[in-house]
Amino acid sequence: MLHHRTLSHSILGGFLFYKILEFASVRLFNSDFVNIQIVVISIMIGFISHIIADMFTKDGIPLFFPLPIKIGIPPFEVLRITTGKFMEKFIIFPAIIVYLIWLAVNKQGELLFLINLIRT
């Protein structure tokens, strides 16, 4: 049985997810109103950033699944984050929220431009 961090957190899983997304998006969205390429790229950026973030956890990720090798950043497990503990809840999550607020305030013009691209 496949668990959360197996196929879905590997290069193979990323490629399969991309192909399924590419196939489904042209059937789900009307290309007259939605730039499907931007939607696919945006979702893949989110997917890849999630995978990279999971590399910072103690468990790491099986990037080369089905090989049982797990990859983590930094390479020493003792320096990585334990999911659901103090570091993640009180330092990482608040830092991400502060960054997103900063991004929305300081890059408002660029964000509105991207939103308008998606709407056209």
Image (cartoon, grey):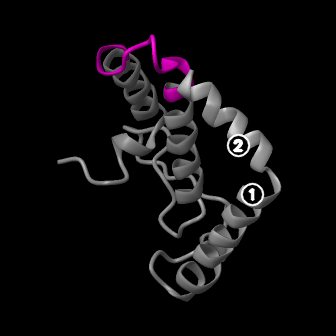
* Vertical comparison of 60 with 64: above or below: below
Cα distance between the residues tagged 2 and 1: 9 Å
Helix or strand or loop: what does disc 2 sit on? helix
Are dots 2 and 1 in contact, CB under 8 Å? yes
User: Which three-letter amino acid code belongs to the residue tagged 2?
Assistant: Leu
* Residue 6 in the figure: left or right of residue 117: left
Residue visible at 49% across and 85% down?
85
Q: Position of residue 53 (x, y in %)?
A: 58, 57
> Does the rendering let one see residue 78?
no
Number of other residues with Cα within 10 Å of mark 1, as a class: few under 14, some 14 to 19, many 20 or more: few
Residue visible at 52% across and 58% down?
54
The front one of 92 and 29 is 29
Q: Magenta span covers which residues?
A: 26-39
Q: Which residue is mark 2?
A: 111
Q: Residue furthest right?
A: 106
Residue visible at 34% across and 22% down?
20
Quarter the C terminus occupies: top right
Q: Which residue is mark 1?
A: 103
